[in-house]
Amino acid sequence: MTISRRAFGLAAAAGALLPALPAAAKAVPPAGAQAPGFYRIKVGSVEVTVLNDATGALPAKMYSGDAAGAEKTLEAAFVPNKAEAPASFNQWLINNGNKLVLVDTGWSGGLGPAGGKMPKALAAAGIDPADIDAVVITHIHIDHVQGLLTPDKKVAFPNATVHVDANELAWWTQGDIKPPDGKPFWKSFFEIGRTALKPYTDAGKVQTFKDGAELLPGVIAVSAPGHTVGHTMVRISSGSDQLLLWTDIVHSTALQFPEPERSIVFDLDPAQAIATRKKVMDMAATDRLLIAGTHIGFPGVGHVAKASTGYAFVPLLWNANI
Ligand SMILES: [Zn+2]
């Protein structure tokens, strides 16, 4: 048979693409569920496990800039619905053989059954939450902080200290709740962030850090403000290897790699968020840095290539060996 679009269409219409199959030995119902998402990579002697809490999409209209252009960009990226920009929700577990450090915690019960899958991924990776020594919160947004508590509001990491940028913690927790603009979601962001941190604060288990702090040997906090006041990236260096957990530098791979000047409605200071994104992308492309993103499709690890317009994400390929 010739390969042509017409031939495929005709064959499909006639049901003639496959020969008749023999009767099945046993009917097996489809599983109807995905395996827990965890993926390991090695950075020098440090093992990093990417965990997945949720996958979903955010309305394209949450992004700044021209809406028709956004639809075209999403269509060119083959997204299923050009009104929605896909977003993953990834976290990371850093194991240097001595300490277990979790970076961010996911939604817990905040998204219903669509989210809060990180604990299952952690279990599938063979990790008991009680063995986690520290949790780094990159910023106090609901999709990063809520998993400090289980869906029934119990402490999820009983033996962990929680580390967060000093400016970030102060902004979200000191004084009255003062939403910075008229956007309706801020109030719940404040309340959920404060609730998630409270039992750890009450137990004296919240510690603050500043830009450049060494969280573990070779694991450095790097301030990347704009999305929030103390939005933090984590740079892991071991031997000649490096990995930059850039967290929320990008919310939509399809939109913001080619068009880094698009901000998202959750950016506290959109102009600063855009400037930070451009700076970090340029650094990652120029230095050929391996990066990992919270909202890049799981496992969301790869490189940043300069493209004719903006940048392109080049995913790291699955590697069965680490
Ligand atoms: Zn986020």
Image: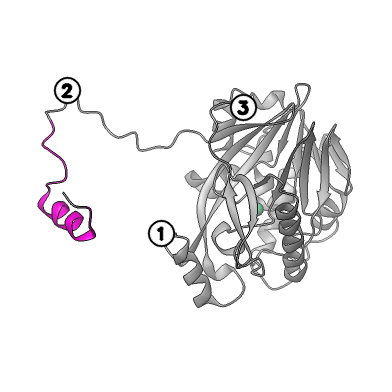
Quick one: label 3 or label 1, which is nearer the N terminus? 1
- Mark 2 surroundings: few (<14), some (14-19) or many (≥20) residues within 10 A: few
Marks 1 and 2 in Cβ contact (< 8 Å): no
- Amino acid under disc 1: Pro
Screen quadrant of the C terminus: top right
Mark 3, secondary structure of its residue: loop
At 22% across and 53% down in the image, what residue appears? 3
Give the label on residue 25, or none. Answer: 2
Q: Which residue is identified by label 1?
A: 80
Marks 3 and 2 in Cβ contact (< 8 Å): no
Mark 2 Cβ inside 8 Å of ligand 1 = no
Task: Report if residue 62 lies within the magenta region.
Answer: no
Q: Which residue is identified by label 3?
A: 322
Placement of 117 over or under 260, stated as above or below: above
Q: Which residues are magenta?
A: 3-21
Mark 1 Cβ inside 8 Å of ligand 1 = no
**Gap in Å between the C-alphas at discs 3 and 1?**
33 Å
Color encoding of the figure: one colour
- Amino acid under disc 3: Ile
Quick one: label 1 or label 2, which is nearer the N terminus? 2
Residue projecting furthest to the front: 2
Image location of residue 293, percent across then percent down: 65, 48
